Image: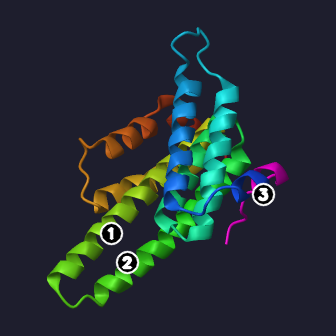
Amino acid sequence: TPPRPILSNSLTTVIAQYPLHPCIAQTLLLRGRVLADCGIYGVADCDIDTDFSLLLQAIRNVEMAVAILRKIDQEYDLATSLALLGTLRTLLGHFNEADRAYEEALSLFRVMRLDAKYDQSQARDEETAAICEQSIKRINDGAANVFYRRGKLYQSRRMQEEAFGWYHKSLILSKCNGANREDSCVRRVVQCMKSRSAIEKIVSAYIDD
């Protein structure tokens, strides 16, 4: 099990004041996303492109949502929230924390996929089997997104070979899930993998060895 980020005492105190309910977690996530968008794209009345203080506030809200989701056993929402947390941490250059968030998200998706596969094998009618199939596709989509995000993380650290490994996993999983080359989940990965500088660095590494 990957290590979980340690929350500050102040954050733990704030979380204790909230009811343990999915709606509270979703509200915190929504607030985190809005703050993140404002931080990344800037506020309309300001000329600043990126407001890192807003990104820090976004992370705080997402971390609180994650803490609540852990306590109420909402695995899928927890996994997608960890993926968002990893993305925000990457934007701030908190690479180790981002990587841990992605690893925990992937661990959750693996467990969920195994459970869904088992339920599918035990399905007694076509309707139940179809529901399980949709659940597996949803989980695969979530995992493919984390693979892609983790690839972006490694590419931002100029670890091109590792990045390509994660991009490849994302591409394969998306294609297994029925995506084609025109789908955005495939196009974004292909675009990253076609990066000329990344390819040149990988080739140079092999030549130098």
Q: Dot 1: within a 10 Å radius of its alpha carbon, few (fewer than 14), some, or many (20 or more) residues?
A: some
Residue 158 in percent (x, y) is at 64, 37
Residue 200 in percent (x, y) is at 53, 34
The magenta stretch is: 1-12
**Res 6 label:** 3
**129 sits left or right of 116 in the view:** left
Residue 110 in percent (x, y) is at 49, 71
Labels 3 & 1 near each other (Cβ < 8 A): no
Q: Dot 3: within a 10 Å radius of its alpha carbon, few (fewer than 14), some, or many (20 or more) residues?
A: few
Residue under the point 39% across and 35% down: 191
Q: In this figure, which colouring scheme has been used for the structure?
A: rainbow
Q: Main secondary structure of the magenta part?
A: loop
**Could you tell me the amino acid type at mark 3?**
Ile
Q: Quadrant of residue 190?
A: top left
**Could you tell me the amino acid type at mark 2?**
Ala
Asked if one can make out residue 206 in the rendered structure from this viewpoint, the answer is no
Magenta stretch contains residue 136: no
Residue under the point 58% across and 36% down: 201
Q: Secondary structure at mark 2?
A: helix
**181 sits left or right of 52 in the view:** left
**Pick the front one: 185 or 209:** 185
The residue carrying mark 2 is 116
Q: Secondary structure at mark 1?
A: helix
The alpha-carbon separation of the residues under discs 1 and 2 comes to 7 Å
Q: Secondary structure at mark 3?
A: loop
The alpha-carbon separation of the residues under discs 3 and 1 comes to 31 Å
Quick check: 118 above or below 159? Answer: below
**Could you tell me the amino acid type at mark 1?**
Ser
Going from N to C along the chain, the mark reached first, 3 or 1, is 3
